[in-house]
Amino acid sequence: MMTHQSVQEYYGETLQSSADLQTNACCTPADMPDWLKPVLGKIHDEVASKYYGCGLIAPEALEGARVLDLGSGSGRDVYALSGLVGETGHVVGVDMTDAQLDVARSHQEYHAKAFGYGASNVAFHKGYIEKLDDLPLEKGSFDIIVSNCVLNLATDKEAVLRGVYDLLKPGGEMYFSDVYADRRMPAELVDDEVLYGECLSGALYWKDFLSISARVGFTDVRMAEHRPLTIEKPKLEAKVNPIKFASAIYRLFKLPELDAGCEDYGQAVIYKGTIPNHPKAFVLDEEHVIETGKVFPVCGNTGAMLTKTRFAPHFELIGEGTTHYGAWPGCGSPDPFQGAVADSEGTAADCGC
């Protein structure tokens, strides 16, 4: 059975840099957008070299936000996010590995100066993401919680998501990248320290992830991006065959009023084009690319995600939502191994919810 100690040893001792990783599993799906590159250019070399992944988990509309990073490691994402939230924002990192935390904490002053701040706007805590209640973190105090390929390493995924739900403000969001499997993992693979440390054998079966999310309060799970994973080492690939893996970014909103499914209340939104670095369109998820100025019909859940969260100043809501017109057809949580949800004719459903 995998333990915290096994993961600590893998990330604190076995791995010395990102070059030591044996797969590309611990990576975010998309290419780095140009507007993020100047921020990453200010990250200290030691912090960057101890970061075991690629890409950056950076949701939109971060100015002034209070952000928590689960499994913050050397602090690369924490420091990048600190540059995006601005001097009035605050970013907290949680990690269980002393060697990683030592690197992160040693560069707080450096990054404050790099971003032109009078003082550091970050903090780091040692602890387990399965036991967020044990840390000095106030419930309902975070606008956004992020995680970059860490949930799969947790020994109790449901405990992590339950803790996240408690820490988020009403309307807050968990925005995170992780690895998922197309089936439940055999016990012998879960006990393989290399496969677990490489973000593979701890991966959740994607339908189990949806079920767990619903149980803790995240009613409507949205997949923002996904891609299939490849395993570059033949020996490791042979061990996991025929299991398929995918990397995905999901959005989980703390909105207790969401329906269990997509429902039609006769509403639409208009995106104002005012979210920084997203002037032409806002991408809520893989099924919602909302062009600036265009009337975009939405189900009740999508309308709430856009107008009862930090995105509210950037959207105009059309319709009072007092009349229910029935279920919105074609909706559901996409299968990361099959692509978008299909409509009755077998094509990707453009249903606006």
Image (cartoon, grey):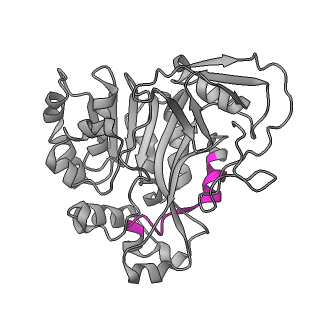
Q: Is 84 one of the magenta-colored residues?
A: no
Q: Quick one: 155 or 134, which is closer to the camera?
A: 155
Which residue corresponds to the image point at 66% horizontal and 41% vertical from the top-left?
220
Which residue corresponds to the image point at 26% horizontal and 44% vertical from the top-left?
75
* Rendered position, 222 above or below 27: above
| Place of residue 156 in the rendered image (x, y in percent of width and height, measured from the top left) | 51, 56
**In the visual, does 60 lie left or right of 211?**
left
Q: Quadrant of residue 353?
A: top right
Span shown in magenta: 196-213
Which residue corresponds to the image point at 20% horizontal and 63% vertical from the top-left?
16
* Rendered position, 323 above or below 195: above
**In the visual, does 166 lie left or right of 128?**
right
**Count of marks placed on residues:** 0
**In the visual, does 159 lie left or right of 237?**
right
Q: Quick one: 346 or 98, which is closer to the camera?
A: 346
| Place of residue 322 in the rendered image (x, y in percent of width and height, measured from the top left) | 81, 18
Q: Quick one: 119 or 41, which is closer to the camera?
A: 41
Which residue corresponds to the image point at 60% horizontal and 67% vertical from the top-left?
182
* Rendered position, 282 above or below 320: below
Q: Is 200 one of the magenta-colored residues?
A: yes
**In the visual, does 217 lie left or right of 279?**
right
For the question of whether residue 350 can be seen, the reply is yes
| Place of residue 325 in the rendered image (x, y in percent of width and height, measured from the top left) | 86, 29
